Image (spheres, helix red, strand yellow):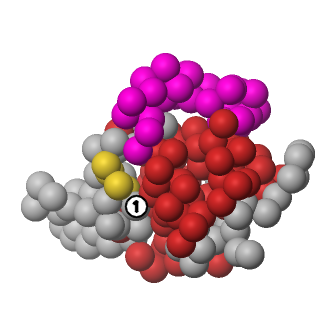
Amino acid sequence: MSNDFRKNPRLASALRGWWSGLDDDRAARAELRRAHDITAVSLTPAYQRAYRRLREAGWDVEGASPLNDRLAAVIGLLAHVKTDGDQSPAQAMSRDDSGEGRPPVSPLRFQRLLEAPDLDALFSGLRRALPLIEHQISITALADDVVYWGDKVKKAWAYAYAWPAKKTD
């Protein structure tokens, strides 16, 4: 069974169900939102309940695997998401709703995300970026991209981001 949320409907459904349940479990959302890093997320009862729910739905990773650290990052980030949108993370970060030619996540900030040296840096950067995109993003796309973060995902983000035209004098 695949750990890819977009390819495994049962896993995606479990993730969406858990995430939707955060609206009724404000204490769990607050607990996850307060977690300052991935280890702190992993140690919360809210994460452990989500992990067990996803395991029942087909998340095929046990114990202290690095993939579970990535899942903890996903769970911690999803506590900050308010709307499950249809845009990938890069599309959401470059969406120009104002029409001013300025994306909500600046090219410099976006580039720093792409250059995040480790998962903790990516987690912190994405936590800071979510308010800029009004907490709206495709939760399954975010989940897959964080779980499989690497050169392939970075390149996909770089191609999907609508880089604003450079102003000439």
Quarter of image, res 86: bottom left
Q: Quadrant of the N terminus?
A: bottom right
Q: Which range is magenta?
A: 20-48
Q: Position of residue 142 (x, y in %)?
A: 51, 59
Q: Please state if 111 lies on the left or on the right of 68 as rendered.
A: left
Q: Amino acid at mark 1?
A: Ser
Q: Secondary structure at mark 1?
A: loop
Q: Please state if 51 lies on the left or on the right of 105 as rendered.
A: right
Determine the residue positioned at 70% across, 64% down.
Answer: 58
Q: Nearer the viewer, residue 150 or 29?
A: 29
Q: Main secondary structure of the magenta part?
A: helix
Q: Position of residue 35 (x, y in %)?
A: 61, 26
Q: Please state if 131 lies on the left or on the right of 112 as rendered.
A: left
Residue 169 magenta = no
Residue 54: in sight, yes or no? yes
Q: Quadrant of the C terminus?
A: bottom left
